[in-house]
Structure formats: C-alpha cells, structure tokens
C-alpha cells in the first residue's frame, strides 16, 4: 500500500541519517584535533621565520671578493724583530716612576715616517704599589734624538694577571727613530715590578710570534765561532 511504501522510505531515510550521524565526531574531539593542527601550523610558521632570519643573517655576513681582498691588503706583516737583546725567557722589570727601558734610555730603533710599526711583550707576576696596570709605550724620536711624541698600548695587564700587550702605530712625520718602553700607567713616585719576555718591535700592523733580531743571532754565531777557535787552539797546543 502507499502507506507501507512511505513508511519504508522513511525508515530508509532514517537509516541513512543514522549512518551519517555515526560518522561524525564529537565536538570536543574535533576541537582537540583542530587545536593540535593549529599548533603544528604555528610551529611550522615560526620555524620558517627562524630559517628566513638565519638566511638573512648569513647574507648580511657574506662579503664580496673585493671586500675580502681589501681586508687582506690592509694587513701589513713584517716579522723581523728590530729590537735587539730580547729573549723568550723571562726577565725582570722594575719601576720607580713610569718607564722601564729594556736596552737603556738612549736606545733608538731607526724607523721610516708613515710606516706602521707594532710592538708586543708578554707580562706575568705584575705588581704595582698603587694597583695600576702595565703596558707599552713608544717614544718617537727626531733626528737629534729628542722626543717628537709618544704612543700608548691599546691593551694592558693588571696586577696579578698575565698575557700579551701590544701597540700598533704609524710613525709620525719627521720621526726617524723609536724607543720601546715598558710602561707603568701611574704618577711619579710609585714603584712596581713584573716579569716580561718576547719583546718585539716589527714593521706592519699585525703582531707576529717572537723571534730574535738577526743581529742577536749573528752575535751568537760569532760567540760560538770564537769559542770553537779557542778550543781548537788549545787542542793544537796540547797535541
């Protein structure tokens, strides 16, 4: 009958709706999945932003060939030690005022105006009466030996510490000589002491490892040759 057919159709529709309802998830479960997905998307976006920032930083720190060449050209390395009577063994410096002259107050190293020079020394066991630091100073000399001007080291060593101090400066116009001074940075009348080694004065704007001055090497060879000659004479006399 028609009513039977209608009931059958209603039952079929209800069954289909029931199946559709069954396939739906609970709202709480849906919200949980949606929230997790949102968090993952946010993490991915943050990671992408971080990678983009790192790439930008890398790009910012990448130099062109001309910039690298220019930086390399700006480095001037000498290597030869122009300061005689130096050693890689510790010696002691004592201060009564500001300056200690390793080779005496009248020791002058010839320089060329406009050239860069670098001095460096290693300090340890530093003690100063008033607690001040120690470093280096260069006195630039004129032809007659008088002081033209002076330059202080960029670095210094505090009492109780140890390490290198250095100074790089361009020789002033009219300067023909330089005197390297171990400097105590304080007023007159205070004392101090320290051990030092590897004093070096070289051309260029970059400090290099200590080496003796060629004159000191030649002097040692001369001493050795003299000693050998003396032994040879004694051997011949005793033969």
Image (cartoon, rainbow, N blue to C red):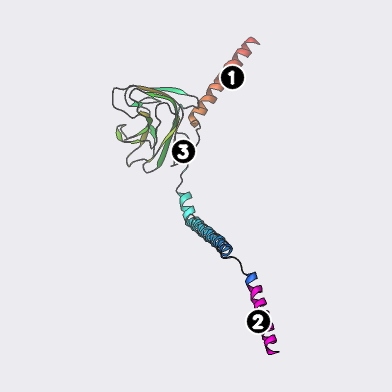
Q: Residue at x 45, y 41 (%)?
A: 206
Label ID, residue 110: none
Residue at the far bottom: name it.
Answer: 2
- Image position, residue 173 (x, y; %): 32, 42
Residue 4 included in the magenta stretch of the image:
yes
Please name whichever residue, 34 or 197, is drawn nearer the observer in this view of the structure: 34
Label ID, residue 10: 2
Please name whichever residue, 49 or 80, is drawn nearer the observer in this view of the structure: 49
Q: Is residue 96 above or below residue 206?
A: above
- Image position, residue 82 (x, y; %): 44, 33
Q: Dot 3 corresponds to which residue?
A: 207
Left-right relation of 176 to 83 = left
Screen quadrant of the C terminus: top right
Q: Dot 1 corresponds to which residue?
A: 228
Q: Nearer the viewer, mark 1 or mark 2?
A: 2
Mark 2–mark 3 Cα distance, whole angstroms, equals 98 Å
Circle 1 Cα neighbour tier, 10 Å, few/some/many (<14 / 14–19 / ≥20): few
* First in residue order: circle 1 vs circle 2: 2
Screen quadrant of the N terminus: bottom right
* First in residue order: circle 2 vs circle 3: 2
User: Which corner quadrant of the image does residue 201 belong to?
Assistant: top left
Circle 2 Cα neighbour tier, 10 Å, few/some/many (<14 / 14–19 / ≥20): few
Q: Which contiguous range is marked in magenta?
A: 1-20
Q: Is residue 29 above or below residue 69?
A: below
Q: Secondary structure at mark 1?
A: helix
Residue at the far right: name it.
Answer: 1
């Amino acid at each position: 009958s028609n009513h039977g057919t209608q009931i059958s159709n209603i039952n079929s529709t209800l069954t289909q709706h029931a199946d559709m309802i069954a396939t739906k998830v609970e709202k709480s479960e849906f919200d949980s999945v949606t929230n997790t997905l949102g968090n993952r998307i946010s993490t991915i976006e943050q990671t992408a932003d971080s990678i983009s920032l790192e790439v930008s930083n890398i790009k910012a720190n990448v130099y062109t060939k001309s910039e690298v060449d220019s930086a390399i050209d700006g480095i001037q390395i000498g290597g030869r030690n122009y300061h005689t009577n130096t050693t890689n063994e510790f010696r002691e410096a004592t201060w009564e005022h500001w300056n200690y002259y390793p080779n005496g107050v009248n020791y002058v190293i010839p320089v060329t105006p406009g050239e860069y020079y670098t001095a460096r020394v290693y300090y340890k066991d530093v003690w100063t009466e008033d607690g001040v630091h120690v470093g280096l100073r260069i006195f630039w000399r004129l032809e007659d030996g008088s002081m033209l001007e002076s330059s202080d080291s960029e670095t210094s060593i505090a009492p109780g510490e140890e390490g290198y101090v250095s100074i790089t400066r361009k020789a002033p116009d009219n300067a023909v000589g330089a005197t390297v001074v171990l400097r105590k940075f304080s007023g007159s009348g205070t004392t101090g002491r320290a051990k030092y080694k590897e004093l070096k004065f070289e051309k260029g704007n970059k400090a290099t490892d200590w080496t003796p001055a060629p004159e000191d090497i030649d002097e040692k060879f001369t001493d050795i040759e003299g000693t050998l000659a003396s032994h040879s004479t004694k051997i011949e006399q005793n033969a």
